Image (tube, rainbow, N blue to C red):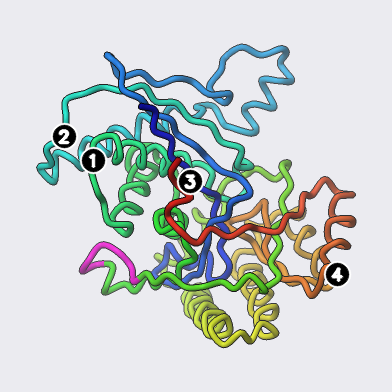
Amino acid sequence: MILRCKAFPRAALVGNPSDGYFGKTIAFVFHNYSAEAELYESPDLDLLPSLRDHNTFASMEDLHKDIVLYGYYGGIRLLKGSIKKFYEYVKEHDLAIDNKNFTMRYKSDIPNRLGLAGSSAIITAAMRCLCRFYGVEIRPDHFANLVLAVETEELGIPAGLQDRVAQAYNHPVYMDFNRSHMEKFGVGKYKAINIPADLNLYIAYRTDLAEGSEILHSRLRHDFNDGKPEVLAAMQEWSSLTDQVRDALAAHEYDKIPALLNRNFDLRCEVCSEAISSKNRRMVEMARKIGASAKFTGSGGAIIGTYEDEAMYQRLQKELKKFQIEVIKPSIVHNMKDAYQ
């Protein structure tokens, strides 16, 4: 029997980048793209390469493009890290599993290194396959921690919990990373919430902005650890913006949301301006000029916001396309069954 499991890209609606600093966020995953892992029993444990793992190129230009998109190490390392951490989890919790091997491979069409959590989606899909294959159940909040450990502990990828929580729950989630709760229980306070279909959301991205989150977080982490007053104040304000958006969603007061999303980005510019590229800033400015709200979905490369009506959405698509920027309406995932085939 072949097992196939999926995970989806994440968009942070509000609160980022405070998730790594005991703040609050709201995030969701969406169907428009996906990462998929496939697993079946085999005599040996075998990992099959995907497109981003090949070593044959038509030219130096093609090799250059491949490295810009995927880095030097491809995706097999994500599978290896997932398997290692899963094995350690099983041993640590003294779980009895069958002594059997498997072949695993993956594929993904999630735009890479654009703040959409593409790497963690591959890990999440792989981990779901391993859990099903060996009959292991892991609570969503602990599952998110396990996925994060693959990236931070095994692979040295700077990352926070927000992406993995949204992907673990497969549902829009309000996340409170309260420091005392995190230190006591090892997880945040997570609550599934509803993002109504009549909230007009768009996501826009361009592939020439692939730069990863480490550019932002290395400086922000330093300032946070040093107790820089403006950074600490920003974390509090991002948490407040998250609560205000949560309340507006619950009350269907959508008219309040655009200004809150805009403030989320403007606050980032106040404390992290040197970590925001001119092209990233320009993408936000273009969307706002048309009348939409705009902020980063993650740490740069893609933006999310609201638009007023279909006419404004069509203008967004038309104007941003001139600069090789794709604009989509996210199809939000609201249940776990979409992760399994």
Q: Position of residue 221 (x, y in %)?
A: 45, 60
* Residue at (41, 44) in percent of width and height: 124
* Residue at (49, 37) in percent of width and height: 36
Left or right: 173, with 92 as reference point? right
Disc 4 residue type? Answer: Lys
Q: Is residue 118 magenta?
A: no
The boundaries of the magenta stretch are 183-189
Total labels: the figure holds 4
Q: Secondary structure at mark 2?
A: loop
Q: CA distance from mark 3 to mark 1?
A: 19 Å
Mark 3 residue crowding within 10 angstroms, few (<14) / some (14–19) / many (20+): many
* Residue at (31, 33) in percent of width and height: 83
Mark 2 residue crowding within 10 angstroms, few (<14) / some (14–19) / many (20+): few
Q: Secondary structure at mark 4?
A: helix
The relative height of residue 39 versus residue 293 in the rendered view (above or below) is above
Give the mark nearer the N terminus: 2 vs 1.
Answer: 2
Q: CA distance from mark 2 to mark 4?
A: 57 Å
Q: Which mark is residue 289?
A: 4
Give the mark nearer the N terminus: 3 vs 1.
Answer: 3
* Residue at (26, 74) in percent of width and height: 180
- Quadrant of the drawing holding the C terminus: top left
Judged by depth in the image, the label closer to the viewer, 3 or 1, is 1
Q: Which residue is mark 2?
A: 97
Q: Are marks 2 and 1 in contact (CB under 8 Å)?
A: yes
Disc 3 residue type? Answer: Ala
Q: Which mark is residue 7?
A: 3
Q: Which residue is mark 1?
A: 135
